[in-house]
Image (cartoon, rainbow, N blue to C red):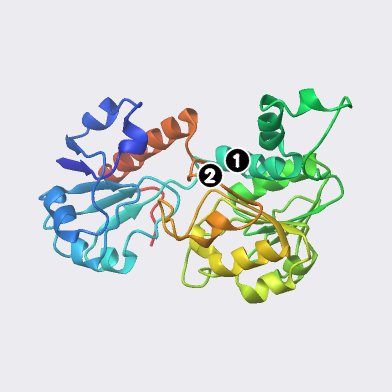
Amino acid sequence: MKIVLLDGYALNHDLNWQVLRQLGNCQLYDRTPVDDDAEILKRIGDAEIVLTHKTPLDDAVIRQAPKLTYIGVMGTGYDVIDLESAKQHQVTVTNIPTYATAAVAQFTFSLLLEITGQVGLHNQLVHEGKWGKTADFTFWDKPLLELQGKTLGLIGYGRIAQKVAELGHAFSMKVIFYNHRPRDNAQSWAKQVELADLVKTADVISLHVIQTPDTIGLINQTTLDQMKDGVILLNTARGKLVDESALATALNKGKVSAYGTDVVSKEPIQTTNPLLTAKNCYITPHIAWAPLETRERLLTITVNNLKSYLRDVPQNVVG
């Protein structure tokens, strides 16, 4: 059996892939051009098993891969796969839905705490000598914000959002959430509301939905206009959930007081992205998933997904 990993650099430069090599003849690539179907097909060759992180597998690739029977997406989101084509060609697709729950929730709050506590800024100012030159024992260069009593609004209420809700509750925030279907298992202190109500009432809004045609541009001029003045917006889901031009304008006008995001619409970020010059915009390079422990878990589940498929009892199947 031939196994091809198309883009393992983010994982494999410090992990041991021997456990995967034990399952078949493995060809591991650090990176594969994402916009070159011919090269993707060349690398897949006659492999039955393909693992991908961000390299897209569209219909043109899937239907021309002669022996392809299984695609393992090494992440939670699977928007890089043409699921309809995979179904038509009897290709099983799996993802990894739970590996980064703790890490992404932690990182979501890291963004929020940076925005409200301004730790990075004041650490920089101290090292630049500003504190040592003040007449008082204390100084702050930007307003600081207390979270207690603020309303945290979560759009989506899957595993990550539920973990973020727990963190918000621990900070004595009021927690509300919108989900496309009722959540009967929500914590007693978390209230499900309609999207319009959440947008209008939350002091902090955090995005936790997958990217679909229905969710692309979910945060747009209309929803931004409906938000509270001074709202904080967080995004550790997908960049395309947000109309970045509209948001940049809202940041520059002060309608949105701050945006903390680990994702943008096109990655790596382009120099023309309007968020780069927007006020109070905190951008990290898609690292919420990247702690070593989290990536080790991802590798373990990737291998277990493949083992289950080979036993004809596939798990974490999507589509």
Percent coordinates x, y for residue 293 in the rendering: 48, 28
Residue found at x 43% / y 56%: 271
List the single residue furthest toward the bottom. 222
Residue 21's image quarter? top left
Is any part of residue 298 visible from this angle? yes
The residues tagged by marks 1 and 2 sit, at their Cα atoms, a distance apart of 10 Å
Q: How many marks?
A: 2
Which residue in the protein does label 1 denote? 107
Identified by mark 1, the residue type is Phe
164 or 310: nearer the viewer: 164
Disc 2 marks a residue whose amino acid type is: Thr
User: Which residue in the protein does label 2 denote?
Assistant: 284
- Judge from the rendering whether residue 266 lies leftward or rightward of residue 12; answer left or right: right
Indicate which disc residue 197 carries: none
Residue at 66%, 52% (x, y): give it: 280
Q: Quarter of the image containing the C terminus?
A: bottom left
